[in-house]
Amino acid sequence: MASSICPTCSCTEIDVVDVSGEAVCVSCGTILEENNIVSSIEFQESGGGAHSVVGQFVSASASKSYGNIGTSGRNYGLESRANTLANGKKKIRQIAGMLRLGDHYVDSAFRLFALALQRNFTHGRKAQTVIAACLYIVCRRERSPHLLIDFSDKLQINVYVLGGVFLKFCKLLQIHLPLIDPSLYIHRFASQLNFAGKTHSIATTALRLVATMKRDWIETGRRPSGICGAALLIAARSQSVMCSLHDVMDVVNIGERTLKQRLYEFSLTPTAQLTYDQVGKLEMSRVECDPPSFQRHREKEVMEMLLLESERLPLEEKGRKRLTRGKRALEDESEGEEKDDTVLAKGMLNKKANYAEDEDKPTVENKDEADKDTAEADTFSDLDDDEINSLLLTREEAEKKKLLWEKMNKDFIQEQF
């Protein structure tokens, strides 16, 4: 700021010209201050005959000025960090253009990329993967209808590699993102399925179904693609629109087993028993059910109880028959002790006489009798038929036990095929 008094004539009238930036004394014309701004580019010649620009270039994102602009006018002699940031922003714009993202997505992703570069997160990783993770974080914050698999398809990067970089970057910067809402992707998938004039009505019905799945805990802990696919398939078929499983699978990028599992879980909820007209009034419905994991655990417990009960009944019947046999044996023994002594003596004499006669028989017959006794022992002649039958399952019991086993080990059987 120029002095208010002229040092030459001590005049206090000072005229300030804004165009030229000069402060002139009105009395004597002395120029007290000048602040000329030169916008033209001047060159100077060095001793070797080379020409260089006079002045310095200061970038908006650089940490220092650059005096060597270069002969081409484009090479400013940038430092490595500034060059990396410039290339990163260029790649961010390219990827954002592939996914049709706005400029504010680019600016937010560039700030995240600068933080990643500052924390050395780009070391040992491809810049393209880090940039995709930064853009996906911005999409999650802005709640845009973009999935991680969209970046994987456009950049031809493994989705699991991209997801791993995304999770590590969020953990490094302590970024807490909101949970994915499946309703954000309903209109996008509905437009890709080409439902003609019923796209809006099908999408509205699918949104109601997604809301009921949230209340029934089906949406918790699951990817949004499966929830959206099941809701759109049910909504389309409820309005008599032909839509196959493979059509939905191709659009939402899920497998057939996942889609069928979501449909099966939905079939166990009270909403599955409603008609199409009743589905339109689901906003007022407050009916809830247990999560699918609770239902599977309870169903498994019931099956195990039935299986244990089916195995316990034959054992109880076997124990009951053995107890009856024991009582019968005790009664026979008590009756035998009451026999007359003369009968016992007579029996012993007969036994001795028979033994003497048997000594005179050939040895072959003795061998045949031994074989006969062994055969009788092998046939379990000492056991009752009822006891043997109690150890064996009937055809109906065997069939029920087989069905229970197959239902309990359904996942194991499917893995074998």
Image (cartoon, rainbow, N blue to C red):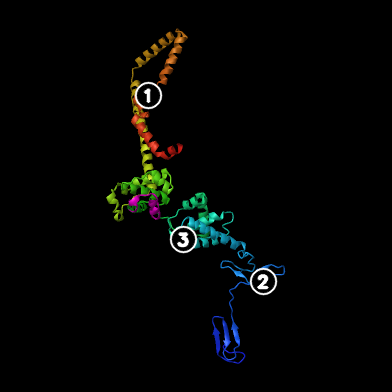
Q: Which residue is mark 3?
A: 102
Q: Which residues are magenta?
A: 183-200
For the residue carrying disc 1, how many other residues have a C-alpha within 10 Å: few (<14), some (14-19), or many (20+)? few
Residue shown at 42% from the left, 18% from the top: 375
**Residue 48 location, x and y as percent?**
72, 67
Amino acid at circle 3 = Gly
Helix, strand or loop status at disc 3:
loop
Judging depth in this view, the residue of 169 and 109 nearest the camera is 109
Q: Distance between the Cα atoms at labels 3 and 1? A: 87 Å
Q: Amino acid at mark 2?
A: Gln
Q: On residue 383, which mark appears?
A: 1
Q: To which quarter of the image does residue 187 belong?
A: bottom left
Front-most of 135 and 366? 135
In the rendered structure, does residue 188 fall within the stretch colored magenta?
A: yes
Query: Which one is earlier in the sequence, the residue at label 2 or at label 3?
Result: 2
Distance in Å between CA atoms under marks 2 and 3: 43 Å
